[in-house]
Amino acid sequence: MAKKKTIDFQALLNEVDTLFPTYQALDQDGNVVDESLVPDLSDEQLVELMSRMVWSRVLDQRSTALNRQGRLGFFAPTAGQEASQLASHFAFEKEDVLLPGYRDVPQLIKHGLPLYQAFLWSRGHVVGNEYKDDLQALPPQIIIGAQYVQAAGVALGLKKRGKKNVAFTYTGDGGSSQGDFYEAINFAGAYKANGVFYIQNNGFAISTPRDQQTAATTLAQKAVAAGIPGIQVDGMDPLAVYTVSKLAREWAANGNGPVLIEAVTYRYGAHTLSGDDPTRYRSKELDDEWQKKDPLIRFRNYLQNKGLWTKEQEEEVMENAKQEIKDAIAEADKVPKQKVSDFLKNMFEEQPQNIQEQIKFYEAKESK
Amino acid sequence: MAQKTMIQAITDALAVELENDKDVLVFGEDVGKNGGVFRATADLQDKFGEEQVFDTPLAESGIMGLSFGLALEGYRAVPEIQFFGFVFEAMDEIVGQIARTRYRMGSTRNLPITLRAPFGGGVHTPELHSDNLEGLIAQAPGIRVVIPSNPYDAKGLLISSIKSNDPVVYLEHMKLYRSFREEVPDGEYEVPLDKAGIAKEGNDITIVTYGAMVRESLKAAENLAKENISVEVIDLRTVSPIDMETIIASVEKTNRVVVVQEAQKQAGVAAKISSDIAEKAILSLEAPIGRVSAPDTVFPFGQAEGIWLPNAADIEEKVKEIANF
């Protein structure tokens, strides 16, 4: 009798882990650790990327303050995720279609959403979502993972139109547990559609830690089941995030199919400012450990060593950002109040009877 | 013109729109080579190619998300959900996303999507294939629910749905697919959305109904005519939103009304119609509003459908009760 084959399940698991290293270009002090991942960006572009990251940090701080003063509504803090958000976005084109999650407002603004509209969205005003035709984006998604299946559709549409553009979408580590996450990468893979799917793994889905989301060692490896490339990148490293995003974009735009990217990052703040208290589920030690990996420190050191960045420059960016925010709040304040009759007109292009009746009723009520 | 079954009329409508507009895309599980499990999309892939007619992986939320994204890119998406009882998997994309996008984006974007799905009892399917879930979608503002009752309307309503820039859930009653034929014009014609049809004129009592219950109501009306009860039958065609003008005009003429639906009695379309009639025309009524529906259980096991589903006899009985009140 032949000897029965023994299968080493642990070895099978371990083998998968070797396929998903964390790509890194800069260490936490800003020294280059992998020259091959340093992108061909001009000095001006490097400075622009740093400026955007600093701008985003200021936006986070100011939004938090404005929220506490009651001048903004919903806000999901972004500090810590600047490299993951702004450096990935920096790799895309204006004609690429952005499908953001609720924390991805900085990318939306850099994609063309006027800041005052972002503030109106936060306040719960419809004008915040009235996107001009040339803004290739959807408003921030609330339902976890819903934007992923939609991105698969946009990605297929772009491919059908023969465009060299992509749909790119973001969710969190919690989002990677949703059925829609898998359906989306599987659909996009099956159609070889032009999509780049991001997971910003910031360690916590509200309070649930990453290691309780899945037994998988990386989230990037979920791509394997869909038959598409998956890659994990140091999400606190702007250069590695940019390089990986740029390569993924090129791969997808050229008709090779979608890519899944997992950026390992951290949010310093609460899940949202609507009552979440991160001290209930995170230790100060953990916060301190991640602060040392801060993308701004890392990139600042890198640029200073190249003679491209000074303290004065940074202060100027911060001052400009504060002024921009102040102006945008003033502009948002000027937008007229919402009307129910307008809401009714937005329901359908062709208005049925019930809507017509209700428009009349509310127009009369609103004219009083 | 040719005599066609309802399913042939539906295939015809899809072919007309696929031909007229290359941005019309028909897709879903098994819709390609197989032509759909009921053959509603038979031969369409051969005629129009895999770019316009294609199979999807098996995942309902994915199908509706795909529809959303394609519509955003300017396509007219005509997805098929293989049986409407499988819609729960896709409820977020339909009700949470597609139905509210125009509203949510201040009418700066439209999503021209027509979701087609078979539904309805009387054909002994396994559970979760036949359920009458139109009331579930009707609860959501921003999306139409269209249910044809005959081949002529099926084609015209489907063409109107596909051409509409607003999203539509278009439900096809399985029992009507092949049960009779009717003259259906070739080429393009439209039956307007949001407008009920008068399936039969009458003076003594109004029946308001839709889908397979239109046939049962017409049968009942025929029998009642022998007893000198003249019944007007209104076929809603669009069950959300509802054409109350046509209903109220009829009720004001006949002063009596029975609302008939195949679905369970609780909540739903008939409840909405009854309350609107009470709100708008109560002084025209000379009797209570009658209702005929299925009982408030889960959709029945195949062998129990005969007793569970409302039929012409149930309708006759209720009409007599209201007529003689």
Image (spheres, rainbow, N blue to C red):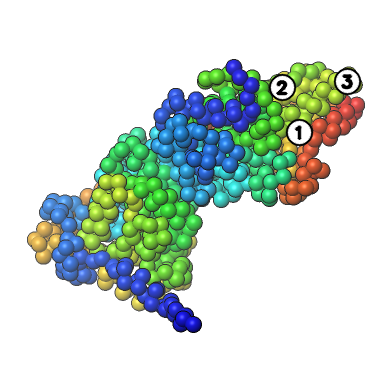
Q: Residue at x 42, y 34 (%)?
A: B49
Q: Residue at x 31, y 64 (%)?
A: A232
Question: What is the crowding at mark 1: few (fewer than 14 residues within 10 Å), some, or many (at least 20)?
Answer: many
Q: Secondary structure at mark 1?
A: strand
Q: Residue at x 39, y 71 (%)?
A: A217
Question: What is the crowding at mark 2: few (fewer than 14 residues within 10 Å), some, or many (at least 20)?
Answer: some
Residue of label 3: B226
Name the side, left or right, on which B310 lies relative to A256: right
Using the image as rendered, state which of residue A297 and residue B173 is in the foreground: B173
Chain ID of residue with mark 1? B
Residue of label 1: B260
Give the mark toward the camera: 2 or 1: 2
Whichever of callouts 2 and 1 sits on the residue coming sooner in the sequence is: 2
Q: Callout 3, which amino acid? A: Lys
Give the mark toward the camera: 3 or 1: 3
Residue A185 coordinates in the image, percent (x, y): 41, 53
Distance from label 3 to label 1 (Cα)?
A: 21 Å
Using the image as rendered, state which of residue A4 and residue B274 is in the foreground: A4
Q: Secondary structure at mark 3?
A: helix
